[in-house]
Amino acid sequence: MQTRSKYTKKSINMPTFYEFCMDNIRSFVIVLVVLIVAYGMKIFHLSISHDTEAIINVPDSLYNSWFTMGRFGLIFLKKILNVYVFNPYLASIFMFITMVLNSAVWEYLFYTFTNNKTRFSKRSWVFPVLFFTAPVMAEQVSFLLQAFEVQLAIFFVGLSLLWIWRGVMSGTVWYYIPSIILLALSFSCYQTTVPLFIAATLALFLLNFEKMEQYWKTIFKLILCFFLAFLLYEIINKIIMAVLNISTTSYISDQILWGSESAEECIKNILYHIIDALCAKGIYYSVAFPLSVLLLFYLIYRKRGCKAYYLYILASIALLISPFFMTIIIGQIPKFRTQIVLPFVFGFIIQYFIGVMDFKFKKLQVLRWIYCIIFILGMQQSMEVSRMFYSEYVQYEEDVRLALKISDRIDQLDLGESPAEPLIIIGSRAPRLNRSSYRLYENPGHSFFEWSFSTQYGTFIMNNFMSTIGYTYLSPTQEQIEYAETYSKSMDLWPNKSSVQNINGMIIVKLSDI
């Protein structure tokens, strides 16, 4: 089924994916090297991170929690890809392979619809290097239990956009059907793919701007595809929850401050986030973002007088705002691992700017210097990411040593190899990292023995972690936890001798005061 399109077949100009990869092999070698620098520690040194202990020991409990968060796509992918039984090595290597594949697919998407294909192969490494080596992406990957599937979700967004724009440009309606299904699947894996799709759609709108004649018709089609995909996701999610007789968790809604905090406080949080990003404050924000803002404003100025100029301005501003959509919705700065739209935006804008200004740069002979600066920025991110995963590795080894010491002390209680008494761990303990490590990241470098918002939660996390390395103990009841909390007030702190005791049919370990 076809509809009339204002685009010509020549304007679509789509090489095969294989031909594109062969033409861009040097760029992908650069991407591969930089990604190995960034994620080598994660790939070649086996360790687990937060929540991974749960998917190994109590997978059904964790998968049920994903259903309540509307992430049924994660479970679906684990089932059909035969990775439902978690393997940390496979998760790491599949994540990396998919990230490399994403680099090629997203560049193929940009190449297909860009106006200036001249010397594209020389700049096709820019976006993936800046996007996939960003520390916020590494924070996402540090949750190893879903790292592979989230990368697949990003892949689905790129593939769906390829088909959507093929439908828009060719007038073929059938392209929209698989794209809507894939897009709904990506939403069901991780909700951050929603603002990612919006940002990517705006990016492609800028790439295709000069080719379009019926702007509002194109905008309507894009909005309709998004609406149908989101509607499909919501319908399937409602059906699954009804069948399983479960309700949506408050995990996401609890993060929304609008209504619980003053509007003034929420607006301040939004402004603080924007300022932090523009000032490249901290390790999670890069100078590449304020640079990309300046570059895009220059392109806006340069495009003045073009057809539908106001739409180009609106799309550009919306693209710059897109990294803060979640901040605006929840009224506070979201977790860093959910901010992957930010590096997507500055990675795209910088590569887009080079493409627009390619001819002028060649005359000025400054292109090589620009590439050098971008490569330095990418390597700087990669080195920070490498440090993150090195810190995670050191923390994991320290946790293993602590688990061994606790188990040895429990063995001294003469309760047998598999005690019938439940284990209760009171308090928390920070890891002892070396000087090359860093523990102020959001997730990497934080010990399993310091996630203790409550005794019940902390005992659950620590007990499951110890079980992943072969030290399995029974879980306590709430009544036993309350008794242990009261009794622990008279106990010494770890590693004193009385910090591990067998009292009233319970093993109590006191790491710190509550």
Image (cartoon, helix red, strand yellow):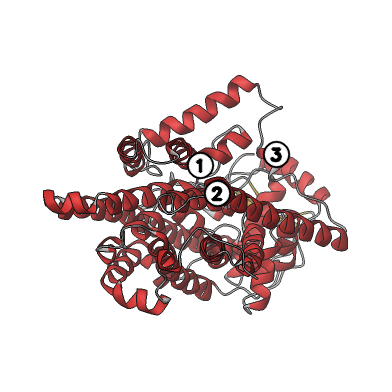
**Is 264 situated left or right of 11 in this image?**
right
> Amino acid type of disc 2?
Ile
Determine which residue is flagged by label 1.
322
Whether pointer 1 and pointer 2 mark residues with C-beta atoms closer than 8 Å, the reply is yes
Could you tell me which quadrant the N terminus lies in? bottom right
Gap between marks 3 and 2 measured at Cα: 24 Å
Q: Regarding mark 2 in the picture, which secondary structure is present there?
A: helix
Determine which residue is flagged by label 3.
254
Is residue 276 shown above or below 430? above
**Earlier along the polypeptide chain: callout 3 or callout 2?**
2
**Earlier along the polypeptide chain: callout 1 or callout 3?**
3
Location of residue 418 (image quadrant): bottom right
Q: Which mark is residue 198?
A: 2
Q: Nearer the viewer, residue 472 or 226?
A: 226
Name the residue: 62% across, 68% down: 2
**Is 405 situated left or right of 282 in this image?**
right
Could you tell me which quadrant the C terminus lies in? top right
Q: Regarding mark 1 in the picture, which secondary structure is present there?
A: helix
Residue 367 seen: yes
**Earlier along the polypeptide chain: callout 1 or callout 2?**
2
Where in the figure is residue 93, as x and y percent of width and height? 46, 74
